[in-house]
Amino acid sequence: MSDSKVFAPRRGDGFDVWVVVNMDGKGGSVTLPLAGFDALTQERFAPGSKLELGRYEHRVIRFA
């Protein structure tokens, strides 16, 4: 992840969440270490998936 992305890990009751925000308007990607899903869109991801971020996009990834 580059300096143009904000990454905020959070811990819930039995799960972890990553809030990832692209700040530079160029987009980018981050590799997810575990299986999870986007809490906003319900899109599912396998371990090692590359999460693409659009311009100024944010994602909320929940890991079980």
Image (spheres, rainbow, N blue to C red):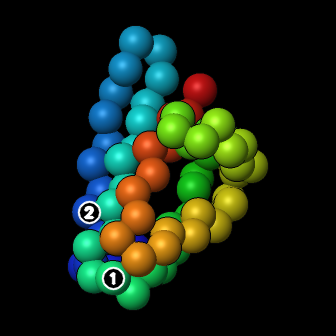
Q: Is residue 62 visible?
A: yes
User: Seen in the image, is 10 located left or right of residue 54?
Assistant: left
At label 2, counting other C-alpha atoms closer than 10 Å, the crowd grade (few under 14, some 14-19, many 20 or more) is: some
Q: In terms of depth relative to the viewer, which is nearer, 49 or 23?
A: 23
Q: Is the Cβ of the residue at disc 2 closer than 8 Å to that at disc 1?
A: no
In the rendered structure, which amino acid carries the disc numbered 1?
A: Gly
Of the numbered discs in the image, which one, if any, rests on residue 50?
Answer: none
Q: Residue furthest bottom?
A: 26
Which structural element holds mark 1?
loop
Q: Earlier in the sequence, mark 2 or mark 1?
A: 2
Residue picked out by circle 2: 6
Q: Is 54 left, or right, of 44 in this rendering?
A: left
In front: label 2 or label 1? 1
Question: If the image is split into quadrants, where does the N terminus sit?
Answer: bottom left
Q: Against 26, is 18 above or below? A: above
Provide residue 48's location: percent of width, then percent of height: 68, 59
